[in-house]
Image: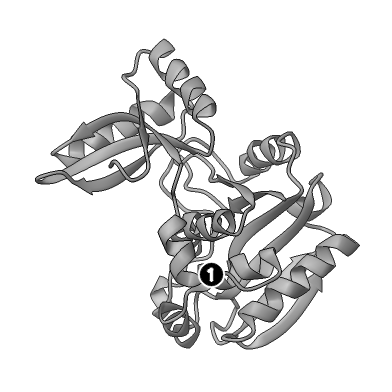
């Protein structure tokens, strides 16, 4: 199955996150946590034989959260995917709720949600699956869609439990519908992926400047730290399963006046 894993929410132009922030309550920032685990989820699914892409909204490009909708839906609905799973974390008004739940709308979504819920509930309190017809990632998506609320980001106990758990593996196993060998998934994670690199710097501030320029031009960008006889801050604009897709991004970067280099996982 061709799958796309999306990260809920984004970082706006003013630097604010549109997600729930559990850090004041000894928790985690929802967006940052899911951004950290999304490639692991995808890596496990690839190791189980699924063609899997990752979608993260570009940071500091949107003025408000409503712009996330058109950015994600256009890519999710036109990519030939059979399933989309969006990663979220829950939060509560009293900061005392706990547990996992998976949201769905369609019948196929219900079946997929139940499988993911069963895996998460082996660790977190089982809040059940929820039918949510008002959410655009469920009612406007062409592929079968689910939204995964793995735990409560503003509950210290849930967050401590998550810190001792391979949440990415649980989500991937739920999507896959069966066990995935953890060691195999970790070894295969990122294998055969192509990263498009726009620059590498020994000073992080220089990498940040390039990242900002890329974002201003409408490119996705992130900074990856590598050790190459010393710390190097690499500015990357995409991760691709197929080299030809990476080559398209390479050409787009060069046309916009940026340097570009395709690097395969395992060589950086």
Q: In the picture shown, does residue 90 fall above or below 15?
A: below
- In the rendering, at what x and y percent does residue 268 appear? 28, 42
Counting labels gives 1
- Quarter-of-image position of residue 187: bottom left
- In the rendering, at what x and y percent does residue 45 appear? 59, 58
Residue at image coords 68%, 43%: 69
Residue at image coords 63%, 37%: 71
Few, some or many residues within 10 Å of mark 1 (<14, 14–19, 20+) = many
Q: In the picture shown, does residue 163 fall above or below 43?
A: below
Residue at image coords 44%, 69%: 183
Residue at image coords 39%, 14%: 254
Outermost residue toward the right? 107
Q: In the picture shown, does residue 107 fall above or below 162?
A: above
Q: In the picture shown, does residue 23 fall above or below 205?
A: below
The colour scheme used to paint the residues is one colour
Question: In this orientation, does residue 64 appear?
Answer: yes
Q: Nearer the viewer, residue 58 or 15?
A: 58
Question: In this orientation, does residue 29 appear?
Answer: no
- Quarter-of-image position of residue 131: bottom right
- Quarter-of-image position of residue 73: top right
- In the rendering, at what x and y percent does residue 125 appear? 63, 88
Element at badge 1? helix
Q: Nearer the viewer, residue 141 or 82?
A: 82
Outermost residue toward the left? 229
Relative side of 260 to 65, left or right: left
The residue at which mark 1 appears reads as 169
Relative side of 258 to 178, left or right: left
Relative side of 57 to 175, left or right: left
């Amino acid at each position: 199955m061709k799958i796309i894993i999306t990260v809920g929410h984004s970082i706006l132009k003013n630097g604010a996150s549109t997600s729930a922030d559990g850090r004041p309550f000894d928790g985690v920032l929802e967006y940052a946590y899911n951004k950290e685990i999304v490639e692991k989820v995808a890596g496990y699914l690839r190791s189980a034989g699924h063609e899997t892409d990752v979608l993260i909204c570009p940071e500091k490009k949107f003025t408000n959260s409503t712009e996330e909708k058109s950015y994600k839906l256009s890519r999710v609905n036109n990519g030939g995917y059979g399933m989309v799973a969006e990663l979220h974390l829950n939060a509560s008004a009293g900061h005392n709720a706990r547990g996992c739940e998976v949201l769905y709308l369609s019948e196929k979504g219900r079946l997929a949600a139940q499988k993911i819920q069963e895996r998460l509930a082996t660790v977190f309190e089982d809040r059940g699956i929820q039918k949510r017809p008002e959410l655009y990632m469920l009612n406007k998506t062409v592929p079968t869609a689910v939204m995964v609320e793995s735990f409560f980001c503003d509950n210290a106990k849930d967050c401590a439990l998550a810190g001792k758990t391979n949440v990415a593996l649980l989500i991937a196993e739920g999507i896959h519908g069966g066990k995935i060998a953890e060691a195999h998934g970790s070894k295969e994670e990122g294998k055969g992926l192509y990263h498009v690199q726009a620059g590498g710097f020994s000073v992080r501030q220089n990498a940040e400047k390039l990242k900002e320029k890329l974002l201003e031009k409408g490119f996705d960008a992130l900074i990856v730290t590598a050790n190459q006889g010393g710390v190097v801050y690499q500015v990357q604009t995409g991760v691709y399963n197929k080299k030809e897709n990476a080559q398209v991004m390479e050409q787009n970067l060069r046309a916009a006046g940026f340097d570009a280099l395709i690097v395969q996982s395992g060589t950086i």
